[in-house]
Image (cartoon, rainbow, N blue to C red):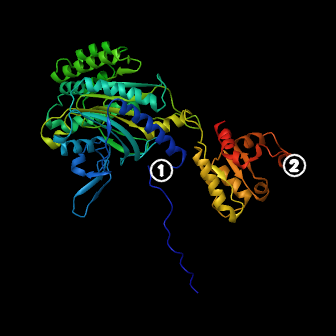
Amino acid sequence: MADKQKPARPKARIPRGFRDRFGAEIARERDMLARITAVYESFGFDPLETPAFEYTDALGKFLPDVDRPNQGVFSLQDDDEQWMSLRYDLTAPLARHVAENYDALPKPFRRYAVGPVWRNEKPGPGRFRQFTQCDADTVGAPAPHADVECVVMLSEALEAAGLARGAFQIRLNDRNALTGLLETLGLADDVNAQKRLGVMRAMDKLDRLGEAGVAALLGPGRKDESGDYTEGAKLADAGIARVMAFMKATAATNAETCARLSDVVGGSQAGARGVETLAAMAMQLKASGLDEARAKIDLSVIRGLEYYTGPVFEAELLSAVTDEKGRPVRVGSVASGGRYDGLVERFKGVEVPAVGISIGVSRLLAALELKGEIAGPEKGPVVILALENDQMADYQKMAAELRAAGLRAEVYVGASGMKAQLKYADKRNAPVAVIVGGDERAKGEVTIKDLARGAELSKDISDNTAWREGKPAQASVNRAQMAAEVRKIVGA
């Protein structure tokens, strides 16, 4: 007799670069977003929500991973044969929204946005294919005043998110200064557009690949640890040396950096404009309390996105991050931004100045967790044990009383006994379990078990008899005092 074929079942797995999230992590992100957006709102920004999908041509091809066949985005074809893509950031959808509603919007238009974005790129530590961004942008205001405001607001938002002052630094550059460099390399014309992009993307990888890696990408190309080969920009040795010298021209003070930069690119009109903007920003930032320790001009900052046209900035953590085994983890920038005066122009045909910032909340949370600067698992709900099926209405009434007292509370609704219910409460990280059986009901009492205190006391008890007789961290109180007593324990 032939064996029966086993039914085909899908394998339970998650796509690479994505992850499930649950409970405390989501609560921490929600709390962080609330603190960040409160800063945005205090500066006068209003919320805007755009769809996850945009038409692919509206998003444009601005991601740095041009060696990927799908340009680093996830796309599908609609039933009307038009291509749509999951948004890769929150800025390109903003440009579409402004262009579509231009006449009705106040100018400048100030908005913030929160939501997931998707990038089809290589995942790594703290780097996922889906992650949350929290942006704020001003559309319709030229440099440098709106740019300075963005940097100041970004500094305040990162502090509100949980980073201590002095734990991070915002690094600034200007794309016009970079344009001046490219002009000295003979790459300013349209014929060299692809080579120019190759140079910029190589420069943007300095903090990740180091000088040798960037030099290889500026030249013939580079093979990474996995064996993947990235074609280089094919610059000659003199051109590579010039680019590396440009990135290393950063000085101790912003004023000195601007002076050095003027010597390098001042002969270019675009370069001179970049130096002038950076100097004005540095002066205003210092007057706002952000000196070089907090906001520093750094000529190695490029920003990979192609749509930037003026000042660009990144926020980096200043202390090393290690994993649970003490190995170094490269986190990268936890926030970034810049000026993109040509993005709305793609739709309108006229230049509309714009600048914005974006905080990578998922990456920032991951970094804070690795640094041990996020508190342990948050308290779960108070769990009311359900020991008698015919008393469920009373158990639910007790839970309602606790919720009315400002506490999270739930009734166990499974089908297990008391021991399993207490294990359930432990897994839920419940601070307290409330027990009411026939004995308690007859006395008009409830038994309150302080699970956190009990776990602490149990470390010093090795004898089962002592455990049963002592009933650590457990007490009976009058039924009317239940909510007040539980609040006292949870508050402690």
Pointers 1 and 2 in contact (C-beta within 8 Å): no
Q: Secondary structure at mark 1?
A: loop
> Tag 1: residue type?
Arg
- The answer to whether residue 274 is left or right of residue 416 is left
Q: Is residue 203 above or below residue 377?
A: above
- Return the residue nearer the eye: 174 or 299: 174
Which numbered disc, 1 or 2, marks the residue closer to the eye? 2
**Residue 369, horizontal then vertical, whole percent:** 53, 37
- The answer to whether residue 434 is left or right of residue 58 is right
Q: Which mark is residue 465?
A: 2
Q: Is residue 277 above or below residue 18?
A: above
**Residue 351, horizontal then vertical, whole percent:** 15, 35
Q: Looking at this view, name the residue that lies furthest to the left.
A: 349
> Tag 2: residue type?
Thr
**Label 1, on which residue?**
19
Q: Secondary structure at mark 2?
A: helix
Between the residue at mark 1 and the residue at mark 2, the CA separation in whole angstroms equals: 45 Å
- Return the residue nearer the eye: 203 or 62: 62
Question: Which of the 4 image quarters holds residue 235?
Answer: top left
Residue at 74 percent across and 57 percent down: it is 419
Question: Which of the 4 image quarters holds residue 96?
Answer: top left
Which of the image's four quarters has the C terminus? top right
**Residue 229, horizontal then vertical, whole percent:** 35, 44
Q: Which mark is residue 317?
A: none
Which of the image's four quarters has the N terminus? bottom right
Residue at 35 percent across and 14 percent down: it is 253
Q: Is residue 49 above or below residue 304?
A: below
Q: Residues within 10 Å of mark 2 (few under 14, many from 20)?
A: few
Of labels 1 and 2, earlier in sequence is: 1
The total of numbered circles placed on residues is: 2
Residue at 66 percent across and 58 percent down: it is 394
Q: Is residue 219 visible?
A: no
